[in-house]
Image (tube, rainbow, N blue to C red):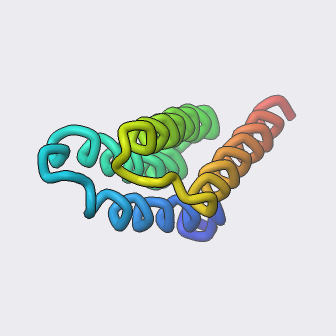
Amino acid sequence: MTHKDLEVYKLSLDLVEDIYSLTKDFPSSENFGLTSQLRRAAVSIPSNIAEGASRGSTKDFIRFLNIASGSLSEVDTQLIIAERIGYVTFPEILKNNINSIKKMLYRLKHALNKKIKA
C-alpha cells in the first residue's frame, strides 16, 4: 500500500481541483495574493501526505501529516476570508470535504502514534 491508496490523499487531490476551479474567477489583482496562497496551501496537503508516507519513519510521516493539517487550516481560513470580502460563496460541499480531510488526518496521526507506542 502506498500514499496513493489512502482516502485522505485522494480527497485532498479532489480539494486541490476544487480550489483551482473556485479561484479561477477571483479578480486578476489577486493572482499573486489570495489566489496564489490558496492554491499553494491546497497543493501542500497531498504533497505533504505523499512526502511523509515516503519517509522511512513513522515519526516523520506524522510530522508531515501535521504540516498537511496546517495547510488545510490555511485553506479553510483563506476561503473564509475570500467569502468575507465577496470573492466567493464558500460552498457547503467544500466545507464538508475540508472537515472530512481534517478528521481523516487526525485519525491517521492517531493510528500512527499508537503504532509508535506499541
Snapshot quadrant of residue 92: bottom right
Q: Residue at x 57, y 33 (%)?
A: 66
Q: Residue furthest front?
A: 86
Q: Is residue 64 visible?
A: no
Q: Residue at x 29, y 41 (%)?
A: 37
Percent across and percent down for residue 52 are 50, 45
Q: Residue furthest right?
A: 118
Percent across and percent down for residue 44 are 39, 46
Percent across and percent down for residue 2 are 57, 65
Viewport quadrant of the N terminus: bottom right
Q: Is residue 23 above or below residue 113?
A: below
Q: Nearer the viewer, residue 10 or 3?
A: 10
Q: Is residue 9 visible?
A: yes
Percent across and percent down for residue 61 are 57, 41
Q: Is residue 88 above or below residue 118?
A: below
Q: Residue at x 86, y 34 (%)?
A: 118
Q: Nearer the viewer, residue 40 or 117?
A: 40
Q: Is residue 2 left or right of residue 47?
A: right
Q: Residue at x 35, y 45 (%)?
A: 38
Q: Is residue 117 above or below residue 17?
A: above
Tally the numbered discs: 0
Q: Nearer the viewer, residue 38 or 58?
A: 38
